[in-house]
Structures are given as structure tokens and as C-alpha cells.
Amino acid sequence: MSRSDAVTFKGHSITLAGDAVTVGQAAPHFTLHYFEGGMQTLTLEDLKGKPTLLSVVPSLDTPVCATQTKKFNESLGGMGDSINAVTVSLDLPFAMNRFCGSEGITSIRSASDYQDRNFGEGWGTLIEELKILCRACFVLDADGKVVHAEYVREVTDEPDYDAALAALKSAS
């Protein structure tokens, strides 16, 4: 997928760093950070063994990103620990932790790419002009193979929840 003019932010074309992640490929490696009793790391290796939803947002401190995280949290509640689910942004881990606590987010963890943006560059989600992540959803099978990839064409729009959840359920 050529994304040079395929993704917009408030109607304006943006440039995404890195290559697009596509269905069928092995998931690119990453190291994210989260706060849980102290600063922790989360890598692709930590997620292998279960199907995984990666919900990528620009910032949890915006209405659409908050809605996306809440909707996935509600939809994933019944799947328990049979899957992994992670919201990825450049928000600081402390802010992400506070948001999830105040909003009762328990079915999807949050992890940050703030330290070196290796997720954004490796997964083709870093908006070069704004230095934040675009909106995207990825589903991985238990072996870390990409079975669903969506780069939301307009960053301020919500993703296709049904398609991501269907891919996650079929990977389970």
C-alpha cells in the first residue's frame, strides 16, 4: 500500500515514516514501555503465543483515541486472557496508566513508543510532520504473523472495529 497520499490528517496529506506492514508478513520487532509498579518493557516476543490486537492511536488525550480504546476494551472483555491487546501511542506511560485507570480500561493494556519511536518507524505509523503515530489497527496470530492491517485513511476517523475484531477472533 502506498501511503504517501493515502493517509490524511484533517484533510491534509501526511508522510508516514517506514514501510507499510501488510497481511502475511512477520510482524516487525519493537520495544514499547509501560508503567506497572515501575517502568516495564513490552516486545513482540512478549506477545507471541496468543493472538494480538495492536490498536495504534495518536494520543489517548483526544476524543477519537479515547473512544477507540474504550470500544476495544468493551469488545475484548469476554475474551479474557486468551488474547493480547495493546493500545500503542507516543503518550508517556504515566499518562497512559492514569487514563486507563480513570476510564476503567482493563481488557487492553497501553504501551508507549515515546523513547525512540521504533514502533512508529518499523510499523510505518509515525507521521513525519507531526512526530506522532497515525491511527491504525493490526492483528497478529500467535506466531507473530500479521493477519489484519488497517491504516485509517483519515487520522481523525475511527478504525473498522468489526474487521479488526473478526480477524482477532479468527486468529484465536
Image (cartoon, grey):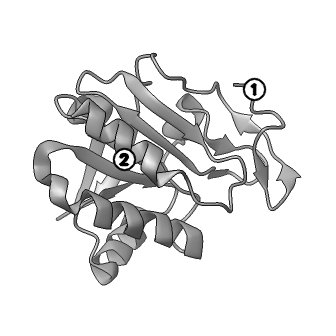
Which residue occupies 55% across, 53% down? 159
Task: Give the crowd class for mark 1: few <14, some 14-19, many >=20 residues within 10 Å.
Answer: few
Which residue occupies 87% across, 54% down? 12
Above or below, 137 against 142 in this view is below
Which residue occupies 26% across, 57% down? 76
Q: Position of residue 122 (x, y in %)?
A: 54, 29
Which residue occupies 51% across, 34% down? 149
Q: Nearer the viewer, residue 3 or 41?
A: 3
SS category of the residue bearing label 1: loop
Image mark for residue 2: 1
Quarter occupied by the C terminus: top left
Q: CA distance from mark 1 to mark 2?
A: 25 Å
Q: Nearer the viewer, residue 26 or 29?
A: 26
Q: Position of residue 104 (x, y in %)?
A: 27, 78
Residue type, mark 1 in image: Ser
Q: Position of residue 44 (x, y in %)?
A: 31, 31
SS category of the residue bearing label 2: helix
Query: Which residue bears the numbered disc 2?
Result: 165
Q: Which label's residue is closer to the chain start, 1 or 2?
A: 1
The total of numbered circles placed on residues is 2
Left or right, residue 59 beside residue 8: left
Residue type, mark 2 in image: Leu
